[in-house]
Amino acid sequence: MAKSKQVPLKVQYMQIAKRSLATSLVQFNEAVIKVLVGAGVTEPSPKQWVQGAKAVSFPCGRCAGTGQFITMVENGVPKGPGGICFRCEGKGRQNDADRRRNHGYDSYTFGKAAHAMMGGGADHDEAKCHCGESATEKWDGTPVCGACWADCCDGAQQQYMEG
């Protein structure tokens, strides 16, 4: 088992700052200091700086800080069908955990869309059996659903090898 490499605290702090919704590093640092002072920390250690950076939150850009999913802005007022904003989970503000979750989701979604644009199809994650059902097994690289695999077990292997 390979040991995981420990990321230096300064690097962690800068990664969090880059992910943040702060407009500048100065704004981010001021927000972290405000969090640390609010927690009663007068002389923070590097670890406390990182913990403060993870706790800092900025208004959500998707819901304009309302916590509700919006689809348009009319005369400067956010409007929409309602529902909880998926970017900030209804809090109206995003912290580092929210930004990490959103980054992972965006990467997955953009990758899936790019795969579909390159001819891979929108449902590239779900393999289909020859009968049209979702495949749960594979025989020699061929997707097979549970029903087809169980149906005629003796002849199934030969059938799927021949195509």
Image (cartoon, helix red, strand yellow):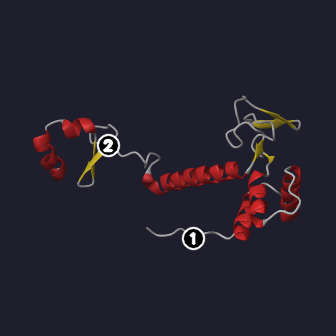
Q: For this rendering, which residue is in front, 84 or 130?
A: 84
Residue 136 circle label: 2
| Location of residue 49 by image quarter | bottom right
Q: In the drawing, does residue 79 fall left or right of residue 100?
A: right
Residue 158 circle label: none
Structural crowding at the residue carrying mark 1, measured as other residues with C-alpha within 10 Å and reported as few (<14), some (14–19) or many (≥20): few
125, above or below 75, in the image: below
- Quadrant location, the N terminus: bottom left
Residue 161 in percent (x, y) is at: 17, 52
Residue appearing at x 43%, y 53% in the figure: 120
Q: How many marks?
A: 2
Q: Secondary structure at mark 2?
A: loop
82, above or below 153, in the image: above
Residue appearing at x 73%, y 29% in the figure: 82
Residue appearing at x 63%, y 49% in the figure: 101
Q: For this rendering, which residue is in front, 75 or 3?
A: 3
Residue type at numbered disc 1: Lys
Q: For this rendering, which residue is in front, 56 or 9?
A: 9
Residue 5 in percent (x, y) is at: 57, 70
Q: In the drawing, does residue 136 fall left or right of residue 162?
A: right
| Location of residue 136 by image quarter | top left
| Location of residue 77 by image quarter | top right
Residue type at numbered disc 2: Thr
Residues at marks 1 and 2, CA–CA distance in whole angstroms: 36 Å
Q: In the drawing, does residue 130 fall left or right of residue 123?
A: left
**Residue tagged by mark 1?**
5
